[in-house]
Image (tube, rainbow, N blue to C red):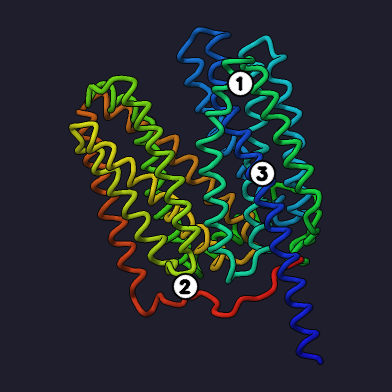
Amino acid sequence: MKNIHAKRVASKGQCGGWKHAGLLLSGVGISNLGDFIYIVAINLMVLNMTQSPAAVAGLWIISPIASVCTKFWSGSLIDRYDQRQLMIGADMLRALLVAMLPLMSSLWMMYAVMFLISMSSSIFVPSSQVYITRLVPAERRKRFNSLQALISSGAFITGPAVAGVMLIYLSPAAAIYANAVSFAASALILMFLPKLGIGDQNIGMGSRLTPRMIAQDWRAVLSFSRKSGYVVGIYALLQIILVVGMSLDAQEVVFIRQVMNLPESQYGALMSITGIGYLAGSMLVWMFAKHLPIRHMMGGGVLLVALGYFLFARSFSFELAAVAFILLGLCSAMANTGLVTFYQNNIPVDLMGRMSSVLGLVLSVLQVASILIAGVIAEQLSLRMVYTVVSGVMLLAALGLWVTSMFPSRSRYYDEPAKPKAMVG
């Protein structure tokens, strides 16, 4: 009788846990869909207002700058407060701020509001990462992360399509308001998630943040990084490889149009191919996640992404570029799912907010620097040469890091729980 009762309780907890996980995925998915609608609409709105390509380019600088300004202190906030409440508050604030954008008459006022939106996003994303780690047990994280990647890839494809339809029949302002509604809907859904409280009761939860407290938190992150150098080093280096890849993306349109001399129609086709490849890759990872070891998802995935960039660098035809973009799309989901799961399994959840902020700060600075450096070097040298050398270095670095994951002494970092447990709920 006791065994039967225990099984019923476990089954009930498991069902409730997946229900909560479904709510979380729904909230994040709706928010992601709104984000991609917003990206299309805000670019067009700024272009219509200013007729200036430079003003549109300025939109892409706002987010990393806001990220740098926020991540100095946001980790201290995330680890001391209820992450669910932070997510709800960030979504509600973003809904309000996005709804204000069509009312702005000045470009600089729009930039200021968008800066605040990006700051809110810099709090929402690591808060959701900590909450997911606490809600989803270790043996189910890989499956959950693969499903989240699938939802994100679906939003990546359907968001611009929805925005295009809205722009045909309505206006950019209507698409912006749709994004505000998506944030409000996400906040409403998140309200039905369980309150998990604060994990570590000894870090001064709910305390007012001070420069001294933030400095102490940075020291705690550096101390953990020294003790767990392999985990932090592998994760950071693989993330750097992906960030450097994104810096190449900033020159993508120039490479396709001016180096390969492809028309705009084929450039658009390559973008669509990438999106379809990412969706297909996300579906494959979701279907076969339990059969794919984390070390191969992470190391092999990043290696294949680097290979995709290298093939693109050496492409002299649309067909070879299409193969490279399919490979990039297919393997990006696998790489990201493996990286996120590795991070969740090896970083203490009570330190995760601060660790995410510090690493995110470093990566944001590196992203801005690598974009600027790649642009300057490309002006002086051949863009194809820059793509070839950078992607070649990425390829060798990814291969070396993947090989290190095979060492028996490192196997404990990639272990996965064999027995499924009931999820929180």
Which mark is first along the chain, 1 or 2? 1
**Residue found 55% across the figure and 62% down from its top:** 143
Side of 313 relative to 29 (left or right): left
Q: Can you identify the residue that label 2 sits on? A: 413
Residue 370 visible in the current orientation: no
Amino acid marked by disc 1: Met
Amino acid marked by disc 2: Tyr
Side of 70 relative to 15 (left or right): left
Q: CA distance from mark 1 to mark 3?
A: 29 Å
Q: In the image shown, does 6 or 381 lie closer to the viewer?
A: 6
Q: Quadrant of the C terminus?
A: bottom right
Which mark is first along the chain, 3 or 1? 3
Contact (CB < 8 A) between labels 2 and 1? no
Q: Tell me the element at label 3.
A: helix
> Which label number is shown at residue 123?
3
Q: Nearer the viewer, mark 2 or mark 1?
A: 1
Q: CA distance from mark 2 to mark 1?
A: 47 Å
Amino acid marked by disc 3: Ile
Other-residue count near label 2 (Cα within 10 Å), few / some / many at <14 / 14–19 / ≥20: some
> Which label number is shown at residue 37?
none
**Residue found 40% across the figure and 47% down from its top:** 242
Other-residue count near label 1 (Cα within 10 Å), few / some / many at <14 / 14–19 / ≥20: some
Q: In the image shown, does 233 or 145 lie closer to the viewer?
A: 145
Which mark is first along the chain, 2 or 3? 3
Q: Nearer the viewer, mark 1 or mark 3?
A: 1
Relative image position of residue 43 (x, y in whole percent) = 54, 20
Q: CA distance from mark 3 to mark 2?
A: 28 Å
Contact (CB < 8 A) between labels 1 and 3? no
Residue 92 visible in the current orientation: yes
